[in-house]
Amino acid sequence: MSELLLAIMLVVPLVLAAAQGLVPRTGWLDHLTAWAALPGLLLALWGNDFSHEVPWLLLGSHLGLDLTGRIFLGLTAGLWLAAGVYAKAYLADDPRGCQFQVFFLVTMTGNLGVTVAQDGVSFLTFFTVMSLAAYGLIVHDRLAASLRAGKVYIVMTVTGETLLLVAMVLLAVQTGSVQFEGLAQRLTASAGRDWIIGLLLAGFGIKLGIMPLHVWLPLAHPAAPTPASAVLSGVMIKTGLLGLLRTLPLGTESFTQWGKLCLAAGIATCFFAAFIGTLQRNPKAVLAYSSISQMGLILLILALALIAPAAWPMVGTALLVWVVHHGLAKSALFFGVGIAGASMRAAPLRGLFMTTMTLPALALTGLPLTLGFTAKGGAKYASAMLEPSSGMLAWVFLLSTASTTLLVLRFLWTVWPTSSPIHSHNRPATGMLVPWAILCMSVSGSFFFVQFRQWTDPAWSSLTASAVWTSSWPIVAAIAFAALMIRPLKRWQTGGRICIPEGDICGPIVLLANWILRSCNPPDGKFPVAGKVALAHPTWVHHFSGIILRKFDELAALVENDTIAALIFALLAVVLLLISLG
Amino acid sequence: MDTRTFFLYAVAGVVLFGIGFHGILFCRNLVRKVLALNLMGAGIFLVFVALSTRAPSGTPDPVPQAMVLTGIVVAVSATALMLALIRRLYRETGFTELPCDLED
Amino acid sequence: MTPQQWLLLGVVASSLIPGCFIFLLGERRATLRSLLNMGGAALKVGLVLAVLWGVSRGQAFEIRYGLVEGIDFVLRADSLSLLFVTLSAGLWFLTTMYAIGYLEDSPNRNRFFGFFSLCVTASTGLALAGNLLTFLIFYEMLTLTTYPLVVHRGTEDSLRSGRWYLLFSLSGGGVLLLAIVWLQSLVGPIEFDGQPLAASFQGQADGQLRLIFVMMLAGFGVKAALVPLHIWLPMAMVAPAPVSALLHAVAVVKAGAFGITRLVLDVYGTDLCDRLNLLPLLTFCAAVTIIYGSFRALFQDDLKRRLAFSTVSQVSYIALGIGVSGPLGAIGGIIHLVHQGMMKITLFFAAGNLAETLGVKKVAQMDGTGWRMPGTMAAFTIAALGMIGMPPTAGFISKWYLAGGAVEAGNWWVIGVLVASSVLNAAYFLPLIYAAWFRPPPEQWPAERERGRFETSFLLLFPPLVTAALTLLTGLLAGLPFSPLDWAEFIVRQEYLP
């Protein structure tokens, strides 16, 4: 039964995508598309753990469900379902709605497949399908900014995919197989493990959005339509984490070098992203930077397991809880941005909206009574196991809570709905409100659910007074700080402000790349592959090959001269003679 | 056959080959090119015949001589074909030179 | 003559006889000509399947005919030749269909289809060749039969390209002949019977063997477009699209690559190549070609020229796979023979469709073509993604094995070459896909022609769809028994390495 559900979950969306492409748009097809993630959710909730070998697929694949996969699948399917329903309402009168549906479905298939893949090749396949199809989502509105975002995204995706391919090949040849079962032991014992780990971290790090590989994220997430941004931030970047969880040799040996590197990268990402995020004006950009910052924290926690393998079980649980919490909260926030664009003329409506928005917003900071509290608790507990740096890590968590709070406040500031909105969708449709409301509630509801079912160790997840105090006082302090800074900030803003554009270091990098290419290229300065090569200005390549061909012609002309020809024939004759004698 | 006679035939063959080769490249008239080709062939046949005397057993090796006979037959057929093509070319265009040679 | 021998002869003759007949037909007899063409193609596919069935039941297929004392004309069906023959037969069937649709109102179709059939005869013959001399005979025949196809249009450009093509091919052929004769005078007749020259071969002939190898590599390298012998290939793009498709995917460049495969695996054998240290040279030439071809493709504005340089680059993957010593690399090289054929022919079919139906010949004109010709451009997209090496297409499987071979042999720099070329491939293919699907179409196409009920005529649409589907399926279902991957593994593991 579970196998059948798995097959349906993967095949039906592709069939629907083909149908969307070939058949003119109909109502029931759109309905089916919106609910296409349902089989995945059913599988996650009621399927049993299994592992099925599919020898004819690709190079021999294994698909199945285990605990990690189940949690990721549940989150993925749930969020795609919500996004599907939301998108149906959000893009109801969009002329390119059909294209969106096709890319939506294919990306969804890839994402769902990633969670059930149990060997490296099928994982990579689904990962690539997901990443490539997401391009269509990002450039949906065909604005110049979106196209630019798409270009950066595809460059980074292709780079990441190539790195992962090399990593997987190394894995396959040096450890004997790409199956995830027992990979940790095999990888620890293999010769080239440093290269493999490095490549995996780089490839999946691009997906996760770790600095300095994050440049695509703040461009892509605001550019995509809201439901797509929600799943991008909510689940798709988490597939990077899933990849690392599946492939890295966690819990076997202490990889101090790599662990320290990840720790440093995680801390840097967390704080830099938070800083840049607070300077953004677009609420979606703020959310994007918030995602980057949270992924930095996740990498940090992962690094703990690399340094101290004994902490791995603890870290694993904490990560899973964090993933679910962040997914739910971030999607709720993105959905809210979409709703904020709708017209809410009555002030009480706006008040209700903002109040409801604060719940997932503060959940991100680790407010008690939300799942964020559990997640942060687990992380702190795990970090306490790392003896020498536990003090520093405690400070990091403190400061990260504060910086996240500031980010969240900035977001709430930017998303405050005005009475005359820019994109008016008239009244926000039911299809948009219901998923959003469910997600907001689930941020807190999941906390109670987890407490009730006691899925987490009470040592760090119970609501004791001290735990509540440790998690709340940074939040309160940050809010107070922000309240104090409002007036000075306003004065500073009107006087001229620092403006870091979305994509921060992307801008300079692109300028540098263009400069390098210009020196190999005709002088219109753009990368020539779009076919706009002006051959009137020959490049050095043309010069070079022109020179060679001219030399060739000159040589040929030389031979036609009679005396030279006669000399060559004499030479030929001598050679013939010598051969005949020998 | 002593070495001097061998050398006479071999060198003559090579010289004929060279003349023929030169002729093919630099003669413009197609019939002359065909003649030059035949000269090249004749040169090669001479070299073959000369080589056939250098067999280790003392008596001349018949295989190269058989190949010369075959070669003569092939040359005759090829010459016939080429002359037919030249005649057709003349009938179609009125020239006995190739278009690229006509331009210079 | 046993039935098996008739079957084998039939495989070669099934394109020879229709070809000869087509020359004698009147120019107006289009239906009869199409019938002969498609009939011959279908017959060939059928006969090849019969041979496959026979081989799978353990029958041996060999024809031996003594030409001169010590020189035999041998046709033999072993697993490598069967792989190539199946590829040729299948792709020829589709290309014939495509050519009939493409050249609907063109002059001189008799001439074209006659030489077309002869070209495939030569290709089949060299696939089934059982010894080096038979291979050479068909190799040279291939040169002669493809020349009229290249100069088919008769324009100044075509004639010039044809001249360069002949120059390169005949020179290469001459060098090859010299090398083969030299080798046979050293070791006697060379058969492709799974017993290559032993590694402990005559120590004092090492220098000669090395030189012969280089000469044969040069001879094959002309057709396989190894740099710097590739110059004729981009020029040959003036030929009509079916010719480009056939030349670049099935017949000519594959013949060169196939020759290199035979050279290393069947003539010299991997042991001797290791002892004489010849493989690094091959790997190096292949690597240079890969990078150079990809790099040049970036700067081409003409679609077919871009695809031509892409071919230059991709065919050297085969040589790279063979040159990297070890079973994984050899598997990678051999399956890339099949996969690249399918992907490249799709790309050329699509390019031909664009030129024929819309008059689109340049990359800059490709905006919005995806919405005007969705089937064609969907096929193009799949093939292009395959070229880049994205899973789950066939190109991914080849890249996997090539990279695996490099890791297995410890040639780390080859991985760098593969990575760089993947990135370059993405750089010159992705903008084409982007332009086709994500840019608005122009007001008017350069030269639009109504060609049928669908986006273009059925004969032009069907072949690229089939080959694109095959690309996807051979990648997705690579684990199936009797997939090209399985076949290649069988070839490498059973026949060459103990």
Image: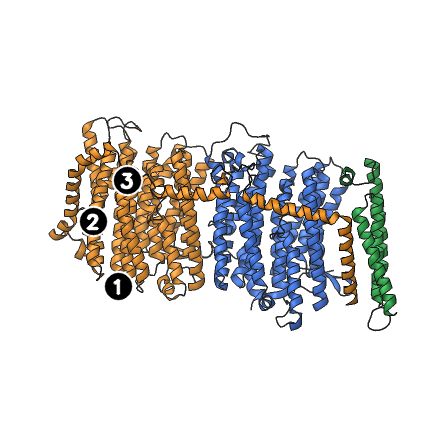
Residue found at x 58% / y 60%: C281
**Lower sequence index among marks 1 and 3:** 3
Closer mark to the observer between disc 2 and disc 1: 2
- The numbered mark 3 sits on a residue in which chain? A
SS at mark 2 in the image: helix
Q: Which mark is residue A272?
A: none
Q: CA distance from mark 1 to mark 3?
A: 36 Å
Q: Residues within 10 Å of mark 2 (few under 14, many from 20)?
A: some
Label 1 is placed on what type of residue? Ala
Q: Are marks 2 and 3 on the same chain?
A: yes
Residue assigned mark 1: A310
Residue found at x 56% / y 60%: C323
Is residue C329 visible in this depiction of the protein? yes
Q: Colour of chain C?
A: blue
Q: Position of residue A25 (x, y in %)?
A: 42, 32
Residue assigned mark 3: A286
SS at mark 1 in the image: helix
Q: Are marks 1 and 3 on the same chain?
A: yes
Label 3 is placed on what type of residue? Val
Residue assigned mark 2: A399
Q: Residue furthest left?
A: A465
Location of residue C97 with respect to A160 vertically, above or below: above
Is residue C10 visible in this depiction of the protein? no
Q: Position of residue B102 (x, y in %)?
A: 78, 38
Position of A152 compared to A44: left or right? right
**Residue nearest the observer in this picture, B58 or A91:** B58
- The numbered mark 2 sits on a residue in which chain? A
Q: Residue furthest front?
A: A563
**Residue nearest the observer in this picture, A157 or A79:** A157
Q: Colour of chain A?
A: orange
Residue found at x 42% / y 57%: A167
**Lower sequence index among marks 2 and 1:** 1
